[in-house]
Image (spheres, grey):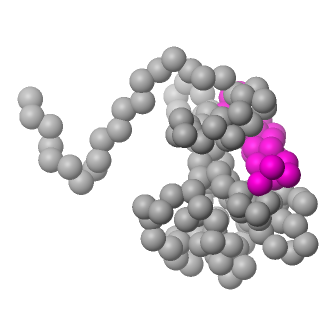
Amino acid sequence: MKVIQIDRYDDAALDAMNELLPQLSARHGPLSARRLREIINSESTHLLMAEENGVYIGCLTLVVFRIPTAVRARLEDIVVQESARRRGVGQALVLQAVATAGTLGADAVELTSHPSRQAAIHLYRKLGFEVRTTNVYRRSVAGKPPTM
């Protein structure tokens, strides 16, 4: 098994993403070729995929961006094919992403995980991630404007 950064579009990566992402969340429809190309071509997103015997078995997206005070890095959409779990695929993906973030100037990497994902949380802690004491706020863009 090896982890590679997807730096050009191919149908196999699209097919794999559309097989993997529903295992993470059923809320979103299929990923389009156009959207995958946007992700691959973006300077701030880095799509990493685990490949074994010519088949993609896991992925994550590393997002790296500059703000006035630092270079920030986040891991998003981490998912491993159900049949490949507990074989070190997730660990390899995360460690490669952390290394890549470091070469891009980030001094830390953040991620979020739903409390029900106990195996993932165990892995993140094992790899040195610590829970931060913070509040995460979210607001829908399509919602009604706030009242003042």
* Main SS category, magenta section: helix
> Considering depth in this image, is 115 or 124 the residue closer to the camera?
115
Picture coordinates of residue 84, whole percent (x, y) = 79, 60
What residue lies at 78% left-to-right and 30% top-to-bottom? 126
What residue lies at 42% left-to-right and 24% top-to-bottom? 135
Q: Residue furthest left?
A: 148
> Considering depth in this image, is 68 or 23 the residue closer to the camera?
23
Picture coordinates of residue 105, whole percent (x, y) = 72, 35
**Above or below — where is 139 with respect to 28?**
above
Q: Answer left or right for 140 relative to 14.
A: left
Q: Which residues are magenta?
A: 85-109
What residue lies at 90% left-to-right and 60% top-to-bottom? 1
Query: Which quadrant of the figure has residue 37?
Result: bottom right
Q: Answer left or right for 94 relative to 136.
A: right
Q: Quadrant of the C terminus?
A: top left
Query: Which quadrant of the figure has residue 147?
Result: top left
Q: Answer left or right for 129 relative to 34.
A: right
